[in-house]
Image (cartoon, rainbow, N blue to C red):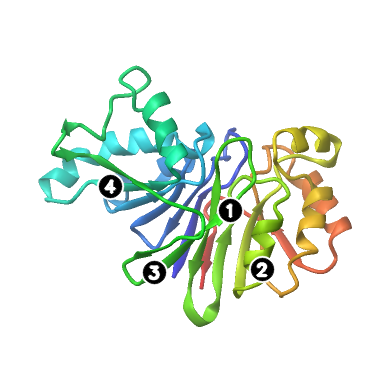
């Protein structure tokens, strides 16, 4: 199983792309600006998009992707791309993005019977099969309804992505029950902005360290969602607070294997 990091930044600048991961070549996990680095043929191979929540930095690639690949997929007789998310997230996408004002409704275009996209609701705790791969929906604690995902790689363990989240005891209770091989977890703010992190339900190094104390098993830990220009300061603070885990900053273009 290969997971390609298309984007892992909390915002944009030259060389920084927002959250998007490509599982093998057909499943996209979140659809931030990093999606735009894929060639057209690679975009057309994406059959499923799993969305953690409705914030723009995680979803803005969906409408543009649909427009780019709709004709190619129709010509090849490919089915609509399946967008999997919590019901509240799908409702937000319909109301605020695919509303005919911000963007055309590609769940009805080019024809209602043959749309470019189809929405599929998910529930926390659900396990869904994507070919031979099993993906579980994890809880998250954010300012909007949100979730994370655990991709089951068999004996190797799970690749876990928390999505955007603040402190979340329910997450660690579940992770204690499975083998975690790789954990991708956010740290959106530095310790000088821990109050802002608390209000916006994100993590800072101080709160991240408290969360990781609940991870008893050894795992590779990757930090995502750091703002451009703040990676060095955030990672120094994390390493000063957490001596138990192997923690590194995720990088766009990185390939994770399980």
Tell me the quarter of the image containing the N terminus: bottom left
Percent from the top left, x then y, of residue 142?
Answer: 63, 41
Disc 3: CA contacts within 10 A as few (<14), some (14-19) or many (>=20): few
* Residue highlighted by disc 3: 133
**Label 2 to label 1: alpha-carbon separation:** 20 Å
Asked if residue 228 shows in the view, the reply is yes
Dot 4 falls on a residue whose secondary structure is strand
- Percent position of residue 51, x then y: 46, 46
Q: Position of residue 125 (x, y in %)?
A: 51, 60
Tags 3 and 4 in contact by the CB under 8 Å rule? Answer: no
Residue sitting at x 11%, y 45%: 75
Residue situated in front as seen by the camera: 62 or 52: 52
Give whichever of 246, 111 is nearer the camera: 111
Instruction: Spot the residue most to the bottom.
Output: 155
Report which residue position mark 4 lands on. 81
Q: Residue placed farthest to the top in the image?
A: 101
Label annotation for residue 220: 2
| Lower position in the chain sequence, tag 1 or tag 3 | 3
The reply, left or right, for residue 208 in relation to residue 153 is: right
Alpha carbon distance from label 2 to label 4: 31 Å
Mark 1 packing: few (<14 Cα in 10 Å), some, or many (20+)?
many
Q: Earlier in the sequence, mark 1 or mark 4?
A: 4
Q: Which residue is mark 1?
A: 139
Where in the figure is residue 17, as x and y percent of width and height? 54, 40
Q: CA distance from mark 3 to mark 2?
A: 21 Å
């Amino acid at each position: 199983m290969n997971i390609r990091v298309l984007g892992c930044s909390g915002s944009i600048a030259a060389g920084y792309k927002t959250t998007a991961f490509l599982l093998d070549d057909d499943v996209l996990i979140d659809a931030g600006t990093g999606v735009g680095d894929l060639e057209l043929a690679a975009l057309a191979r994406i059959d499923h998009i799993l969305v953690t929540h409705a914030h723009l930095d995680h979803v803005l690639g969906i409408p543009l992707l649909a427009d780019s690949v709709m004709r190619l997929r129709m010509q090849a007789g490919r089915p609509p791309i399946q967008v999997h998310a919590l019901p509240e997230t799908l409702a937000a996408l319909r109301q605020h993005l695919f509303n005919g004002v911000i963007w055309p409704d590609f769940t009805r275009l080019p024809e209602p019977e043959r749309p470019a996209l189809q929405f599929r609701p998910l529930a926390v705790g659900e396990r869904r099969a994507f070919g031979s791969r099993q993906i579980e929906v994890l809880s998250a604690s954010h300012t909007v309804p949100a979730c994370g995902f655990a991709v089951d790689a068999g004996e190797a363990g799970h690749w876990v992505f928390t999505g955007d989240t603040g402190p979340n005891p329910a997450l660690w209770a579940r992770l204690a029950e499975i083998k975690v091989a790789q954990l991708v977890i956010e740290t959106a703010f530095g310790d000088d902005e821990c109050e802002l992190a608390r209000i916006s339900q994100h993590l800072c190094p101080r709160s991240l360290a408290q969360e990781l104390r609940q991870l008893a098993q050894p795992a590779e830990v990757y930090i995502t969602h750091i703002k451009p220009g703040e990676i060095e300061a955030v990672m120094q603070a994390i390493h000063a607070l957490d001596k138990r885990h192997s923690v590194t900053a995720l990088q766009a273009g990185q390939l994770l294997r399980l």
